Image (tube, grey):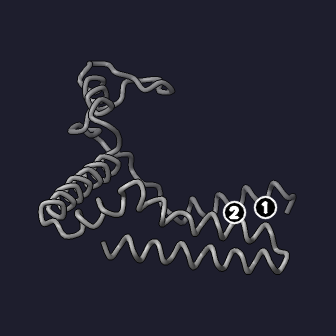
């Protein structure tokens, strides 16, 4: 009852401001103010205000909003984890099947890729750093004719 009275008063005040604005020859602004001021009385007439008042004081409604919030939080958490892992479940299954096939080759590869657990038996011997640095410098100097 109080909410309906407040909404009616707000609408009446808004319409009064719209009349004063129209008197000052600002018709576009007056029509816009009138439109905004008719919204509260329209909400009262449709019953939205009564529904909101009943919902605001209902513990069951607030528990329902809490359950919706938890559901939204769980959904967003799973989406974040999914993005971090790199794709949807369907994409991960397809990648796992492709990795299980023997001789699976990447599109641009010339030889099959190694599995996760296998490493090359021998590592190439590292060249001495001093020789590489000077050979690069010599090549640059020769290129420039020095």
User: Marks 2 and 1: in contact by CB < 8 Å?
Assistant: yes
How many numbered callouts?
2
Q: Assign the C terminus to one quadrant of the image.
A: bottom right
Q: Which residue is mark 2?
A: 137
Residue 145 point in image, percent of width and height: 87, 58
Residue 114 point in image, percent of width and height: 31, 32
Q: CA distance from mark 1 to mark 2?
A: 6 Å
Q: Assign the N terminus to one quadrant of the image.
A: bottom left
For label 2, the SS is: helix
Q: At x 31% / y 37%, what residue is drawn?
A: 88
Residue 49 point in image, percent of width and height: 35, 63
Q: Is residue 114 left or right of residue 26?
A: left
Classify 88 as above or below 82: above
Q: Is residue 107 left or right of residue 97?
A: right
Classify 16 as above or below 140: below
* Quarter-of-image position of residue 134: bottom right
- Near mark 2 (Cα within 10 A), the count class, few <14, some 14-19 or many ≥20, is few
């Amino acid at each position: 009852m109080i909410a309906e009275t407040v909404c009616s008063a707000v609408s009446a005040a808004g319409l009064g401001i719209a009349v004063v604005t129209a008197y000052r020859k600002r018709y576009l602004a007056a029509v816009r103010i009138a439109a905004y001021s008719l919204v509260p009385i329209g909400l009262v007439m449709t019953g939205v205000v009564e529904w909101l008042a009943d919902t605001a004081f209902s513990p069951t409604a607030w528990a329902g909003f809490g359950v919706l919030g938890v559901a939204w939080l769980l959904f967003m958490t799973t989406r974040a984890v999914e993005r971090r892992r790199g794709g949807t479940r369907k994409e991960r299954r397809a990648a796992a099947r492709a990795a299980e096939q023997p001789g699976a080759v990447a599109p641009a590869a010339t030889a099959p890729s190694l599995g996760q657990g296998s490493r090359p038996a021998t590592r190439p011997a590292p060249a001495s750093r001093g020789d590489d640095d000077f050979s690069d410098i010599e090549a640059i100097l020769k290129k420039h004719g020095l």
